[in-house]
Image (cartoon, coloured by chain):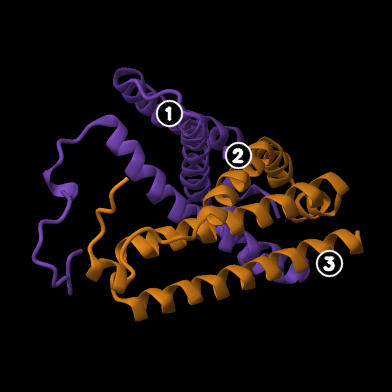
Chain colours: A orange, B purple
Amino acid sequence: MSDFRTDLGKVRGIGAAKGGVHEFITHRVSAVVLALLLPFFIYGLLKALPQGYDGLIGWVGSPVGAFVLLGFLTAGIYHGRLGINEVISDYIQSTGMRSFSMILNALVSVSAWLIGVLAILKIWLGA
Amino acid sequence: MAKGWTDKRPMSPHLSIWKWHPTMLSSILHRATGVVLYFGLLKLSVVLAFLAAGPQWFAKVEPLVYSPIGAFAFFFVVGVLLYHFLNGIRHLVWDIGAGFDPKLANMVSLVTILVSAISAAYLTWLLAGTLHGAVA
């Protein structure tokens, strides 16, 4: 097969990114995890919300509740971070701003995940 | 969008020149709801932290949940969540190469939007009494 790429294009590195398969696949795998957990998440939320503070503590403190919340938050923030990165790479054209946004996204995502996970573990282990 | 773009060659068409149709709407909504849900997860983490900190701390964020605004936020976020969930399943089906018939795809788009809005309204109605601020 003949090569349609120009020499200048090759030198500038224009073409396929040669990366991103991992992100593509894990975005979908985390989507499947979220789809499986969502019914449990909504059911738990609907049961806990009417009982206020005690209901929510009881939900997060139960083994099933803690498992569902840990899984949902982990898969959700992972999936969300990949999604936001996709939006960033679509709309932000300046390389510097794009890198800055993606690093900020990583920091916010990991922070939110840590805050949520530590909170769930504190409630669950203290229950 | 093309700010700072110096390449003179033609760009691929943007949103402004397309005629609106259901699959386009559902594609845009999928991205928009995804961004909303990311912030929803950040809020979930913060509320969990306040919950873990004890009742006196949880009382500070309680009005965010148990109030008319909380009820509306619940309706909005649950609707957005259900839409992203249903349309996400459709994306997974698309990934295996099925469901691309335009007529079917357009119908699925409208059904997805309607089902998520109606389900969110129903779930909010189930909680309407408690989200109104009855719980101490």
| Residue A52 appears in the rendering | no
Residue A122: image tag: 3
Amino acid at the residue labelled 1: Thr
**Residue A96 placement (x, y as % from top left):** 36, 81
Residue at the disc numbered 2: B129
- Using residue B132 as the reference point, say whether residue B36 is left or right of it: left
Q: Which residue occupies 83% across, 44% down?
A: A64
**Residue A110 lies in what quarter of the image?**
bottom right
Tell which subunit mark 2 falls on. B
Per the image, label 3 sits on a secondary structure element best described as: helix
- Residue placed most toward the observer, B68 or A123: A123
Front disc: 3 or 1: 1
Q: Residues within 10 Å of mark 2 (few under 14, many from 20)?
A: some
- Residue placed most toward the observer, A44 or A69: A69
Residue at the disc numbered 1: B112
Q: Residues within 10 Å of mark 3 (few under 14, many from 20)?
A: some
Quadrant that contains the N terminus of chain B = bottom left
Q: CA distance from mark 3 to mark 2?
A: 30 Å
**Residue B40 placement (x, y as % from top left):** 53, 56
Circles 3 and 1, Cβ within 8 Å, touching? The answer is no
Q: CA distance from mark 3 to mark 1?
A: 38 Å
Q: Which residue occupies 52% across, 33% down?
A: B89
Q: Which residue occupies 31% across, 32% down?
A: B23
**Residue A82 placement (x, y as % from top left):** 51, 58
Front disc: 3 or 2: 3
